[in-house]
Image (cartoon, coloured by chain):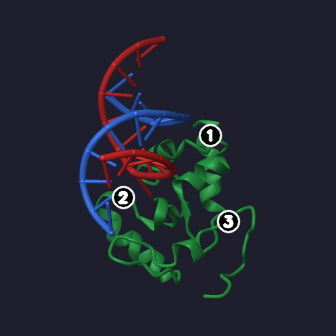
Chain colours: A green, B red, C blue
DNA sequence: GCATTGACTAGGG
DNA sequence: GCCCTAGCCAATG
């Protein structure tokens, strides 16, 4: 267990329900803005329990890989109120979790 | 300890 | 608007 890894997990757990964050965002929270790939590598298989890895998506609203669990990920996001297309998150820019701004709710649709 | 891989990102064609 | 290439970082073999 590396420090970076635990920080990544902590960042993911900080994502509020109904919100999503990109690997780059998680990496930034972990202190490595360019470690987006490493973030995905760490979450390989969602090692840590209680970690809403389904809220972690790719840049531009792309769900990313997630193997065959892509369907599950989409269902989980939809269950939280996040509209997900075939392979893209709708309103991603609105639902994107911003730790610095921490918007409680999306403004003007 | 070195080399390869991987749920990625941004830029160019 | 989609596909390919280059870059970056950590984990794994």
Task: From this view, report whether residue A42 is shown above or below residue A11.
Answer: above
Whichever of labels 2 and 3 marks the residue nearer the N terminus, that label is: 2
Q: Residue at x 41, y 64 (%)?
A: A63
Identify which residue, A50 or A58, lies in the foreground.
Answer: A58
Pointer 1 residue: A4
Q: What chain does badge 2 belong to? A: A
Pointer 3 residue: A98
Front label number (2 vs 3): 3
Q: What chain does badge 1 belong to? A: A
Residues under numbered marks 2 and 3 in contact, where contact means CB atoms less than 8 Å apart:
no
Q: Residue at x 60, y 55 (%)?
A: A25
Crowd around label 3: few <14 · some 14–19 · many ≥20 (10 Å): some
Q: Residue at x 40, y 69 (%)?
A: A73
Give residue B1's position: percent from left, percent from top: 48, 11
Give residue A94's position: percent from left, percent from top: 59, 76
Question: Considering the numbered disc 1 on the image, is that residue within a helix, a strand or a loop?
Answer: helix
Q: Quadrant of the N terminus of chain A?
A: top right
State the CA–CA distance, disc 2 to disc 1.
Answer: 21 Å
Identify which residue, B11 or B1, lies in the foreground.
Answer: B11
Q: Residue at x 66, y 51 (%)?
A: A29
The picture quadrant where one finds residue A87 is bottom left
Front label number (1 vs 3): 3
Residue A66 numbered mark, or none: 2
């Amino acid at each position: 267990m590396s420090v970076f890894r635990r920080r990544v997990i902590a960042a993911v757990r900080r994502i509020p329900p109904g919100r999503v964050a990109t690997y780059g965002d998680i990496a930034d929270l972990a202190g490595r803005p360019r470690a987006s790939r490493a973030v995905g590598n760490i979450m390989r298989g969602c090692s840590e329990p209680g970690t809403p890895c389904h809220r972690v998506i790719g840049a531009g609203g792309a769900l990313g890989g997630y193997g065959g669990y892509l369907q599950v990920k989409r269902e989980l996001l939809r269950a939280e109120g996040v509209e997900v297309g075939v392979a893209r998150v709708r309103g991603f820019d609105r639902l994107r979790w911003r730790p610095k701004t921490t918007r409680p709710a999306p403004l003007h649709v």
